[in-house]
Image (cartoon, rainbow, N blue to C red):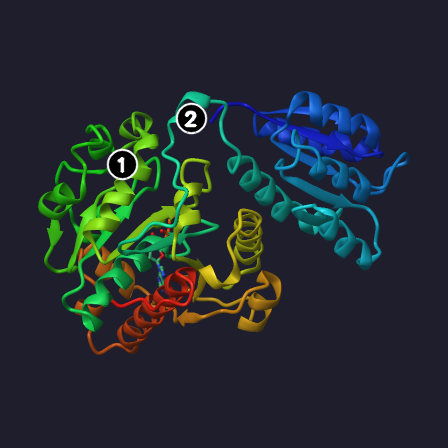
Amino acid sequence: MAEKTALIVDGDGASRNFLARLLEQKDCRVLETSLGREGLIFAWRDHPDLILVDPKLSDLPGEELIHKLRADARSASIPAIALSSDPNPAREAACREAGFNEYFYKSANDIPALMDAIELWLASRPDETPSTLEQTAPLTAKQKGGLLIIFISAKGGTGASSLCANLAMNIFLHQPRARVVVLDSVLPIGSIASIVGYDGGMNLVTLAAMPPAKTDEAFFRENLPKLPAWKFHLVAGSPDPESAASLRADRIGQIVQSLQAAFDFVFIDVGRALSQIILPIIQQADLIAMPVSPDMGTVRLSRVVWQYLQSKGLSKDHIFTILNRAVGFESISKAEVEGTLGLTVQSALPHLVGNLLMANSQNVPFASKFPNDTASMILKEVALQMITHAGRVRAESQQGGSYEF
Ligand SMILES: Nc1ncnc2c1ncn2[C@@H]1O[C@H](COP(=O)(O)OP(=O)(O)OP(=O)(O)O)[C@@H](O)[C@H]1O
Ligand SMILES: [Mg+2]
């Protein structure tokens, strides 16, 4: 990742120093000022990747500062976090309303969540590699073809890859003739291949190195490996970091388009990626499946991801939340998850103790390994819910048409 720049606008010197130290530890270049008006000048002149503001400023309120930033093309899309010393709860609503993406109180308890949010927002900004960005295939019109279902997780280990593979497999139980493909775009190392037991040489990196004219619908129909036990075809992810470094990311758009032409369902595991490369594909998705584990850290990060997706034009309708109890303990209730996330939890999976790990390590679908387990019934049900939901979103996007599987 290229070096990122953060701008701190805070009237309190101690707060500025504290934040600057944290950011510098993350190899971030830091610009600081105690004044709102100077903050505006820095933002417009230096184009930081992230702006942190204590809304209680001496020269202008933070709400006015963010309003001005949002109204100016040079700063309209720069993520901004309010870091507030104002205990009045109404301030949060006012700040969010005025355009801040996130709002945190200055409290020791909130520091880990703040740091996670900073990392996520910084990662969401494009690196300074315009050549790659310019080459990114523009995906403007809603694509036709297979339903596109993206798995995204705000935090590692929430079960995104396992659920992506297992739910894709479960489509077969509802629609045995449907053609399903799973693409792993997680960098630097994809994990779907190791879950399903694929060790062939074809993967996203090798496919992206081929000329676009070759990776067309017919090519994917005929040449992708099919995994008989899993009932789907696979575009494996990058096998190692070195391969990932040579990935022609600008090719992913066309590959996804061809896959949608060749398959009825295209599942993509994007892991934690919210990069500018993946974003156009996420924006084209019929559904975004977001596994969330019931701990506050993950839920708050998932909220950051959801707000980011919202700022990019995605509505609640596009999100399919899966409360996945990937860990044995449960720190918060479903209602608390929903309250914090601002989204309804649409499906829930129980804690599977070591069974999912066992199925994964033997490269077999959970439903085949444990056909009589209640969780197999739940997975089947969730798969149906998910494809029905995706079909509805597609039909609505086609203005009242219906989507036939
Ligand atoms: N409901 C569950 N019950 C028990 N274990 C689970 C559950 N869901 C996931 N796991 C386990 O959690 C681990 C992480 O799962 P997985 O790799 O699918 O998550 P991920 O979100 O893709 O993680 P990463 O960030 O590493 O890509 C695996 O060992 C998996 O078996
Ligand atoms: Mg994963």
* Mark number displayed over residue 371: none
Amino acid type at circle 2 is: Glu
> Which residue was labeled with disc 2?
134
For disc 1, the neighbor class at 10 Å (few under 14, some 14 to 19, many from 20) is: many
Q: CA distance from mark 1 to mark 2?
A: 23 Å
- 1 and 2 marks in contact (CB < 8 Å): no
Q: Is residue 4 above or below residue 65?
A: above
Task: Give whichever of 89, 175 is nearer the camera.
Answer: 175
> Which residue was labeled with disc 1?
238
Q: Is residue 190 above or below residue 358?
A: above
Q: Is residue 117 left or right of residue 375?
A: right
Which of the two discs, 1 and 2, labels the residue nearer the N terminus? 2
Task: Give whichever of 277, 82 is nearer the camera.
Answer: 277
Label 2 sits on a secondary structure element that is helix
Image location (x, y in percent) of residue 90: 81, 58
Label 1 sits on a secondary structure element that is loop
Image location (x, y in percent) of residue 139: 38, 41
Quadrant where the C terminus is found in the figure: bottom left
